[in-house]
Image (tube, grey):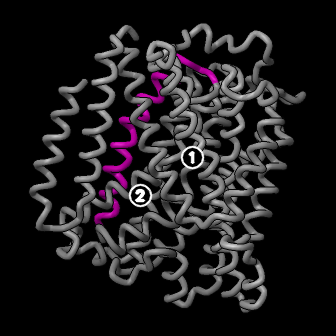
Amino acid sequence: MLQLLLATKTRQELLQGDAHGAALNRSLTTWDLLAIGVGSTVGTGVFSITSQVAAQQAGPAVLLCWCAGGAGCMLSALAYMELSARLPVAGSVYAFAYHALGEVFAVVAAGCITLEYGISASAVAANWGDKFRTLVASLGAPSFASHLTTKIGPVTLSFPALVVLLLVTALVYVGGDLGKRFARVSSALAVILILLMVAAAMTKFQAEHFDPFVPPEFGPAGVMSGCVTTFFGFLGYDEVCCMAGEALEPQKSVPRAVLGTVFIATLLPALGSVALVGFLPYSDIDANSGFEVAFRQRGWTFLSHMVSIGELIVLFVVTYMCFLAQPRVFYALSMHDLLPRRFRDLDEHGTPWFATLWTGLLLIACGALLPFSTLANAISGGVCVAFNLVNCSLIVLRRGGQVAVRHLGVALVAFNLFSFLAAVLLQRGGEGLLAWSRMASLACSILTLLAL
């Protein structure tokens, strides 16, 4: 039974797929993949995480947090780059785990990336709906804003989130050149909006806001906690690997796009953190809407509203990019008979149309009916497991893929257990626990290395 659960697919089997299924249309260039990666990542870091870390965890050292988070993210990105070059197929972590670890791990990986891509799109759409209602109320229409949601039993239906997910479903369903053009234009627009916002804040830059660089009320523990928080601003770069089945020259274009995405996802929030702290003392920064509130406090009402509108545009782009990957995951599962064959049906543009429709129904139900906080907690757990599965897959493949089952089980359990403990201990914020946390984290890291 264990041998069946750990049955793997060879590289050739994954590349060929099911003999009865049509292949995805390989038409995405490096620039297309980079647009998808950037569109999936840049919004959350600049608009949400930067202000949260600056106000509550690290102060001016938010810049250091982004640099450290980018360096840590690059370590996982290197594993994605190597595996995507070896296995340029749809499915990302699912395909990697199926090849290296076995079917049961592939199914777990599919669940994790469904949380990261599909449910993440629902979460962002729900967040979009909340921010849209806030903007409408701030523009003088609180009564209209209150009618944008309605109670259905124990849940609340968000009409803005419903509309966004319907639009995104239609865009992905149409596919083809329209989808590629939208990805390019929307990602470029998101970057331009962020740069304009940063440029406006830099006109009132004051260097004294960076002294002290690490505020005493936060200290090293706050900076460490901020580094962990910023890591979630990079989530989405691995979506590039999920699109590998549609990439031209995937062995070259996918690793390049992953590298470029991580670099841009580090650079833009780092610039944003410098601009925000230079514009306003960290003690005055609003943790939820840093730039919007900062501009409003300066009396720049027009810019404040522009930031709100820009954030809605960027969140729509993120919703589209996250949605885009999920039908490809269902397609990959169907190719290995883990979902019905209908999920592998393609239209004339090479888009998995049936999988797209079912993705739309699933995400509309989640995004319109569930609150953002509920979805966000599930996503975080799924992403952590997915990253561990990628690293485990690379370790197994580098050892030739011939690790004994009994040794593999012990190693993977130890790796994930000690990695989880180290991550939990690193997030302990109390000053009195800091020394203990460092020692325990070091011990967990050493034991993890021994497990490998």
In the image, residue 350 above or below residue 37:
above
In the image, residue 351 above or below residue 420:
above
The earlier-in-sequence mark between 1 and 2 is 1
Q: Residue furthest front?
A: 1
Q: Secondary structure beneath disc 2?
A: helix
Q: What residue type is labelled 1?
A: Leu
Q: Which residue is drawn at 58% across and 38% down?
A: 239
Q: Which residue is drawn at 66% across and 72% down?
A: 154
- Magenta span includes 83: yes
Q: Secondary structure beneath disc 1?
A: helix
Single out the mark in the foreground, 1 or 2. 1
Q: Which residue is drawn at 22% across and 32% down?
A: 448
Q: Where is residue 243 in the image (x, y as percent from the top left)?
A: 65, 31
- Frontmost residue, 401 versus 340: 340
- Frontmost residue, 252 versus 208: 252
In the image, residue 314 above or below residue 87:
below
The image quarter in which residue 401 lies: top left
- Frontmost residue, 201 versus 87: 87
Q: Please report the bounds of the magenta region as a residue range.
A: 60-89
User: For the stretch drawn in magenta, what is the main secondary structure?
Assistant: helix
- Magenta span includes 223: no
Local crowd size for mark 2, using a 10 Å CA cut-off: few (<14), some (14–19), many (≥20): many
Local crowd size for mark 1, using a 10 Å CA cut-off: few (<14), some (14–19), many (≥20): many
Q: Where is residue 88 in the image (x, y as percent from the top left)?
A: 59, 20
Q: Where is residue 155 in the image (x, y as percent from the top left)?
A: 67, 70
